[in-house]
Amino acid sequence: MNRIQTPRRFAEACLQRALQFAVAAGVAAALATPLQSDAKDTVLNLYSARHYQTDEALYSDFTKQTGIKINRIEAGDEQLLQRLKAEGANSPADVLILVDAARLWRAQIDGLFQPVESKRLNERIPAQLRSNDGTWYGFSTRARAIVYNKANVKLEDVDTYEELADPKNKGKVCTRSGSHPYMLSLIGSRVESMGEAGAEQWARGIVSNMARPPSGGDTDQIKAVAAGECGVAVTNTYYWVRLMRSSDPKDKEIVSRVGFLWPNQSGAGAHVNIAGGGVAKNAPNKANAIAFLEYLSSPSAQTYFAKGNNEFPAAKGATLNNPELTSLGSFKQEQIAVSTMGKNTIAAQRILDRVGYR
């Protein structure tokens, strides 16, 4: 369900669109009753796929610093993409935030962003973590790390992505659905580094080595490793750090049984993905939208991403301020542009279909 925090006019317009959207299967009906918004209004209409309660402090700080009030709609990435397409030129959205390179690339090629001219953003966010056409920027990063059962798996047998497809790990590998964007982006990076044929051979080996059919999210994979259901799995780093920071004795027990490692440190490095966003194509408050994106790249907001949601900052020179995240140590990152990974997800999906990776 969308979470909406808006003035009455914004809420009524969005509710009416949502009802029409359902009746018309998410196409033209959402164009009715457009939101009227003056570009000088001190508001920002945010469509966000981030659903973290800790982000409240981030939004409040932006409003405190700028006086710009945030009207927010939260939903899944796919829901937001479909909504923006349906709303078209009548969309009230100023900023679209998504949580994966594949989805950001999808929004880019669907024309849902507009180019942004910002010296601050270009100086703060490395070129590798933004689009090639100046339409979106990454604001936080996470690595796709490997976790393994310390009781029955040797670190040296699983310390690269390639080894997960090696026959020595048959019956040990667990992952979430291959079609999930986190996995599509990982496979997209394999396409870039190994070629499509090599990535297909790798994916086929993963399927052959699975301990069970893909299911659940990243936390479920970690729990399955701790329980001995799997020997090894891949996970985004913030899920692991969330367990590390938990005071729940059950979570502490899970962490004690599971080993964590940075993959491919003697080779290309660990796969890194992003959460990011850009100015919506038909943003009625473009200046406020750019101000918000620049705020997300600021030192205070970047430090918050690390402290509030266990993500690595994307901007240059930002600090972590998160002891558990810091305890993971520095690591070598794979030098593949996130926009390239997004583009490669088309090939990645073809690979999944051919090898039966569900």
Image (tube, rainbow, N blue to C red):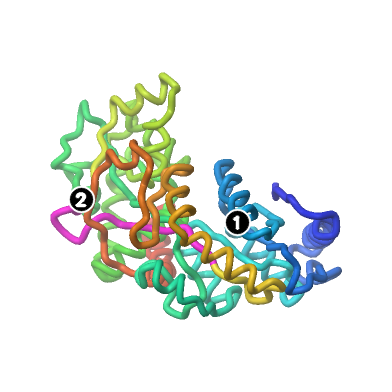
What whole-number distance in Å separates the C-alpha atoms at marks 2 and 1?
44 Å
Q: Residue at x 79, y 59 (%)?
A: 14
Q: Position of residue 119 (x, y in %)?
A: 46, 76
Q: Amino acid at mark 1?
A: Gln
- Residue under circle 1? 65
The span picked out in magenta is 263-277
Front residue of this view, candidates 169 and 323? 323
Please tell me whether residue 91 is drawn above or below residue 49 in the rendered image.
below
Q: Residues within 10 Å of mark 2 (few under 14, many from 20)?
A: many
Q: Is residue 78 visible?
A: yes
Classify mark 1: helix, strand or loop: helix
Q: Is the residue 111 above or below the residue 201 in the image?
A: below
Which residue type carries mark 2? Thr
Task: Please state the horizontal and vertical placement of residue 248, each as a whole percent of the image.
Answer: 45, 22
User: In the rendered view, does 94 fall on the left or right side of 37?
Assistant: left
Q: Is residue 231 left or right of residue 122?
A: left
- The spot of residue 66 in percent (x, y) is 63, 60
Is residue 171 something that shows in the picture? no
Judged by its main secondary structure, the magenta piece is loop
Q: Residue at x 82, y 71 (%)?
A: 36
| Image position of 149 with respect to 339: above or below | above
The quarter holding residue 271 reads bottom left
Q: In percent of the image, x 37 and y 55: which residue is there?
A: 318
Q: In the image, 170: left or right of 347?
A: left
Give the mark, 2 or 1, whose residue is nearer the N terminus: 1
Q: Position of residue 217 (x, y in %)?
A: 46, 42
Check contact, mark 2 vs mark 1: CB within 8 A: no
Q: Does the magenta segment cover residue 241?
A: no
Identify the mark at residue 160; answer none if there is no mark: 2
